[in-house]
Image (cartoon, helix red, strand yellow):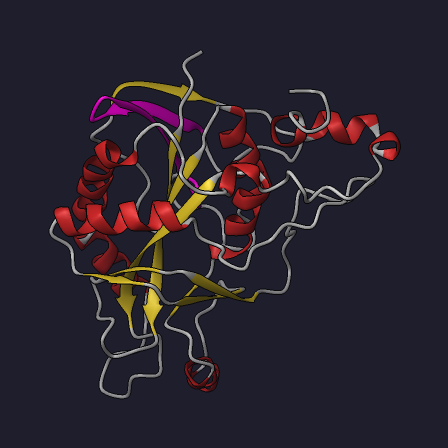
Amino acid sequence: MSEVKLAVIGGSGVYDMESLVDVEERDVATPFGSPSDTIVIGTLAGTRIAFLPRHGRGHRLTPTEVPYRANIWALKSLGVERIISISACGSMKKQYQPRHIVIPDQIYDNTKKRTYSFFGDGLVAHIGIADPFCPHLRQVLHQAVQAAGGTVHMGGTFITIEGPRFSTRGESNIFRSWGVDIIGMTAVPEAQLAREAEICYATMAHVTDYDVWHEEEEAVTVQMLIDNLMANAALSKKTIAEMVPLLGKERPCDCGQTLAAAIITDRARIPREKIEQLKPIVGKYLGEG
């Protein structure tokens, strides 16, 4: 079984990566159910990459229904150390125009119905997530988007709403007053689960619309979202190809040591079944690596 270090999670409108060669498919069973879809593993620019469509092929899962824990657990079990998330987003600022790319550095969580952690049930860990996106991976992604010819904005706060509906005008204007930059439905809990799993995570957010706050622009629709995402699909794939040679083998960040001082439960009191459940994530700290 070949090990992969890099994964791409495709959002709305991005359900495959045709540029991958020497392709194999993996159906990974996890303690948290099945992932969103079969994981496709292939070679791009000489590197093995795992690709997973977040909403499933054919877009079968709402943002709330996405099995985030299963997705991250499955990628971790394959050896993944870095994840690039391709996500649709609405712009909350005039300068972030449709078909631009934003690489956010912060998240505001406005979701309500999700499971946010691998931990609980006898094993407690408190991770630090002051900076929820990997700083090194963000820098590399920024360079790659520029090299691919995209218009890219570095930094910004990504508010995540529950969905699947879009915002009301009142909500959109309130969110803008909070100072957020872009809006979407899937960064939470994906980013924090990746951090718990000690995986570097960065988002390439594709601006598809101005949400509903911009009085001079048409309110967001599904067709608008898909049209703008498809227009940037080639950019997404070119960006990944440009990024691979820039990554290097070593990770010059702290993402890979997130749990070193985060597990607070007395080791002798952690249930054996919980250790087994999270073995790919906590095994190296609990003598099961």
Residue 279's place in the image compared with 242, above or below, is above
**Residue drawn at (61%, 28%), measured in percent from left and top?**
30
Residue 235's place in the image compared with 20, above or below, is below
**Residue drawn at (21%, 70%), measured in percent from left and top?**
97
* Part of the protein shown in magenta: 38-56
Q: Is residue 192 visible?
A: yes
Residue extending farthest to the left is 149
Estimate the x, y position of residue 270 in percent, counting from the top left: 83, 33
Answer left or right for 123 relative to 40. right
- 180 or 68: nearer the viewer: 180
Among the 4 quarters of the image, the one containing residue 81:
top left
Residue extending farthest to the right is 269
- 171 or 116: nearer the viewer: 116
Among the 4 quarters of the image, the one containing residue 250:
top left
**Residue 44 shown in magenta:** yes
Q: Quadrant of the C terminus?
A: top right
Q: Is residue 67 visible?
A: no
Answer left or right for 20 relative to 273. left
Answer left or right for 278 relative to 221. right
**Residue 93 shown in magenta:** no
Residue 223's place in the image compared with 81, above or below, is below
Estimate the x, y position of residue 1 in percent, counting from the top left: 45, 11
Magenta highlight: main SS: strand
Estimate the x, y position of residue 28 in percent, counting from the top left: 53, 24
